[in-house]
Amino acid sequence: MLRISHAIGLVLTFAAALVATSPAFALTPDEVLASIRKEAAAAPGFQGFSAARGESFFKEKHGGEWSCSSCHTDNPAALGKHAKTSKTIQPLAPAANPERFTDMAKVEKWFKRNCNDVLSRACTPQEKGDVLTYLLTIRK
Amino acid sequence: MLPNGKNIFRWVSVAALVMCGTMSVARSSDDNGKHDDGGKVVRFTQTDPRYQQECATCHIAYPPGLLSTDSWRKIMSGLDNHFGTDASLSAKENEEITAFLVDNSCDFWGAEVSPLRITETDWFQREHNSYVIPPETWKNPVVKSPANCPACHLESEHGDFSERYIRLPN
């Protein structure tokens, strides 16, 4: 009995250690996109995402001073530069930066911040999905 | 050499830096806050991984000792509109980062008005006045903004503001 509980304890400890040391990329960008799609599909008339629409959305201004590309540049696989502080920003396209779009909380946090900066409102799931679809078409 | 009229402000700000540096040394178990350039603290070594992650994406991790407790509290309570951009955090992240900033803040920086910008503090303006920095330097597109410390302080991203790492861009 003691041995069994010991063994279970060992297995649990090992499993916990595995979880703790596994890479921080909890999701793949495709899984993040799937999660956004689920949200977008709830809207009536949803017809899927479009990379072309995402690209225009990314590069155009939306009534404010900035577009997405003001900081991330017209090439999201390249290094960006903060429009105000000039601080270097790591590439946004997952092909160039595997850390991108692997953590749902982080994705939501940055969409909230940056959509407010660019559009002065939250982005719709459709807009987020279009942009991510566009970013996923970019090769290094 | 004793301070005379024109230099007195510079001496006061140096004294303030030394005092805050002493405080940061006392707080840390390792050699925190290096003194050179005539006793002035020019290296800030307090870091926090959450502060780095959440704040240093858009600008350098400004050393917490460059602002007062009140200034940091005001900044951290208004992140939804952080100098014109949305830098909002979750309540938990906000609480943790505020604690780090406040713990390492410095109230010797003419804190009575608690400016939100480091560049509005009295000491910053004295250290960067037109005798020290030619006005055309501020207009240089490489500098762009006085918030862009690394344009001249090459090691500022690592908290090192010592004179040996200052280069005014051409």
Image (tube, coloured by chain):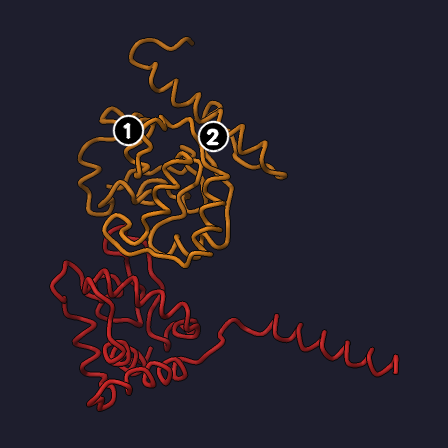
Q: For chain A, give the colour.
A: red
Q: Residue at x 30, y 78 (%)?
A: A132
Q: Quadrant of the N terminus of chain B?
A: top left
Q: Residue at x 30, y 34 (%)?
A: B115
Residue that badge 2 annotates: B41
- Determine the image quadrant of residue A140: bottom left
Residue reaching furthest left? A63
Kind of residue at badge 2:
Val
Image: B61 above or below A75 = above
Residue that badge 1 annotates: B125
Image: B24 above or below A43 = above
B53 left or right, relative to A69: right
Q: Quadrant of the C terminus of chain B?
A: top left
Q: Residue at x 46, y 56 (%)?
A: B92
Q: Secondary structure at mark 1?
A: helix
Foreground of the two, B141 or A47: A47
Q: Position of residue B124 (x, y in %)?
A: 32, 30
Image: A61 above or below B48 = below
